[in-house]
Image (spheres, rainbow, N blue to C red):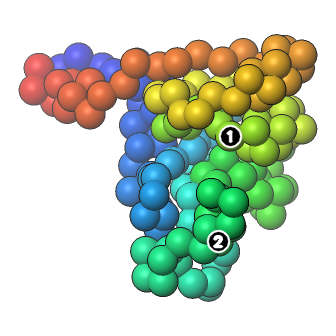
Amino acid sequence: MQRITWNQYFMAQSHLLALRSTCTRLTVGATIVRDKRMIAGGYNGSIAGGEHCSEHGCYVIDGHCVRTIHAEMNAILQCAKFGVQTEGAEIYVTHFPCLNCTKAIIQAGIKCIYYAQDYKNHPYAIELLQQAGVKTEKVEWQKTDVLSAFSS
């Protein structure tokens, strides 16, 4: 059996988290990792106990669903809620982070973003990441990467 790489492993976790998303427009998952250990995960959806887009439709203002908390933000807030340090951590995200999530990632002290898909990569987000010295790396990822490990 062939072992998957760490990047494939953590990206697979993010894709698994995305399956919990309640957004009908885009499913996103995020996994925060420190020292090769998952410290938090998140997916895009409504506040705990709130109405979900999958049940009530999206609440769109100026082209954005305001009902949804993004996966990256949910993962960072999970760390804050349970007192888990994010300084120096890495984040694996199914899609390139939006501008607001990029700013939160920088403020949380996360040092590297691994993402599987480009998604409206905002030029200012890229500029901020460069200014802050946050590394970004696109991880080529497909379900078959993980599944092929089981067929070997």
* Residue under the image location 62 percent in, 85 percent down: 49
| Picture quarter with the N terminus | top left
User: Residue 115 location, x and y as percent?
Assistant: 54, 28
Q: Which mark is residue 98?
A: 1
* Residue under the image location 33 percent in, 21 percent down: 4
Q: Nearer the viewer, residue 50 or 92?
A: 50
Would residue 16 be found to the left or right of residue 112 on screen? left
User: Residue 36 location, x and y as percent?
Assistant: 59, 28
The quarter of the picture where residue 152 lies is top left
Residue 49, compared with residue 104, is above or below; it is below
Please name the amino acid that badge 1 sits on. Answer: Cys
Can the viewer see residue 131 in this picture?
yes
Residue 136, compared with residue 70, is above or below; it is above
Q: Which mark is residue 37?
A: none
Name the residue at the front extreme. Answer: 62
User: Which is more N-terminal, label 1 or label 2?
Assistant: 2
Would residue 22 be found to the left or right of residue 73 on screen? left
The quarter of the picture where residue 146 lies is top left
Q: Which residue does the numbered mark 2 point to in the structure image?
A: 67
Secondary-structure class at tag 2: loop
Would residue 55 be found to the left or right of residue 137 on screen? left
Can the viewer see residue 33 in this picture?
no
User: Residue 124 location, x and y as percent?
Assistant: 80, 26
* Residue under the image location 56 percent in, 58 percent down: 44
Please name the amino acid that badge 2 sits on. Answer: Arg
Would residue 143 be found to the left or right of residue 81 on screen? left
Residue 23, compared with residue 41, is above or below; it is below
Q: Nearer the viewer, residue 19 or 123?
A: 123
Residue 68, compared with residue 70, is above or below; it is below
Secondary-structure class at tag 1: loop
